Image (cartoon, helix red, strand yellow):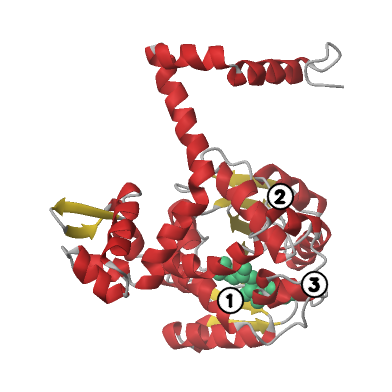
Amino acid sequence: MSGGSPKAPLKVRWIARRNAVFASPRFQYWCAKLPLVNRIARARAGEAFDILAGFTYSQILRSYVESGLFDLLGHGPVGHQHVASQLDLSRDAALTLLRAGRALRLSEEPIEDGWMLGEAGAVLAADKGAQAMVRHHRLLYRDLADPLELLRKDRKEPTELSRFWSYAGALHGAAERGTETAEYSELMATSQHFVADQVLASYRFPKNARLLDVGGGHGAFLMHMGNAFEDLHLGLFDLPEVAQAGAAILSQRFGAHRVTPHPGNFFNDAIPEGYDVLSLVRILHDHDDEAALKLLTNIRASLAPGAQLLIAEPMARTPGAQGMGEAFFGMYLWAMGSGRARSADEIAAMARKAGFVRTKAVPTPQPINASILIAFA
Ligand SMILES: C[S@@+](CC[C@H](N)C(=O)[O-])C[C@H]1O[C@@H](n2cnc3c(N)ncnc32)[C@H](O)[C@@H]1O
């Protein structure tokens, strides 16, 4: 049944009709003429062009990060010849890169041949976590070089990302469960502020609470929470070598009396009891539905009635942050070989299936970085 068929549901027929109108040269001609419609049409055309050009934009940003151009511009104004000699580029190549970044507000030329950071450049140059992500995306782009081929392989072969995230590769037999956890743990720690800031802006821990961060990596989330809530006890659960490294960092900052390490496997080992709040920060989306439900069920079994599970990660179909969910994480996690981006509603349904009595979505200021869902035991 085609979308235009009279038997198709009304909504389907409406979308088929709308798409036919949008595609018509006559409609596009009139859009260009009418002032208000023209503004909407221009915005839509801009969005379409951004999709088309996105890869190029990413590679421009990557060049700024990998070459050290952000640092140079941070000490600007600098001339393009200086940039050329520092980056080992010809003068024309340096100018091309500076101008390309200007279009994206990474750089700016306030005086003739005096280049400085642009608005977006100033933000990114100061954010080591964002830069670490940009460097890391080298792996993602290799996996995405032929996206259809990647999809057709149906996650049955190792990828750059499944090797990097050794636990994800191991789940699919793509790699041995490695001891190679340091690199991903470091990346997660430097980018943790994206999520921790959302939690700090949106959630208050009960007084004298005991918090267990499940899959807490090197303890970066607990570091943020421990600094903000001085009476919080900090438990860290992760694979043995990760939990050990994380607990050492946290104990150094807060003293061993405030920190309890829990080395283990969150699918197979019991989750420690006696905590008021458990957190899953950028964990659930790493895992396929069956595994994610198993993890939630395992966590639920450890919780006393009234205890809370705080789930924080970029979620799918979040208004204003749709691209981050099913587009970026959809493809990223596909390439990683495990997990998928879920909407808050899907996670809530899964939590209820795992035995949680109710859930509450907590709005965050920047859902592009993370949304929050609380599940109550
Ligand atoms: C994507 S990282 C997130 C780390 C941290 N929550 C954050 O947001 O920075 C996933 C974490 O889950 C841990 N992990 C993966 N599989 C695990 C398992 N089966 N048991 C315990 N920890 C696991 C990894 O070692 C890693 O620290």
Identify the element where label 3 is drawn.
helix
For the question of whether residue 357 can be seen, the reply is yes
The amino acid pointed to by label 3 is Leu
Which residue position is annotated with label 2?
347
What residue occupies the far left of the structure in this picture?
Answer: 111
Upstream in sequence: badge 3 or badge 1: 3
The tag on residue 184 is 1
* In front: label 1 or label 2: 1
Q: Nearer the viewer, residue 188 or 30?
A: 30
The amino acid pointed to by label 2 is Ile
Residue 208, given in percent of the width and then of the height, sits at: 51, 68
User: Is 279 rendered above or below residue 366?
Assistant: below
Q: Residues within 10 Å of mark 1 (few under 14, many from 20)?
A: some
User: Residue placed at 58% from the left, 76% from the top?
Assistant: 184
Quadrant assignment for the N terminus = top right
Upstream in sequence: badge 2 or badge 3: 3
Gap between marks 3 and 1 measured at Cα: 16 Å
Quadrant assignment for the C terminus = bottom right
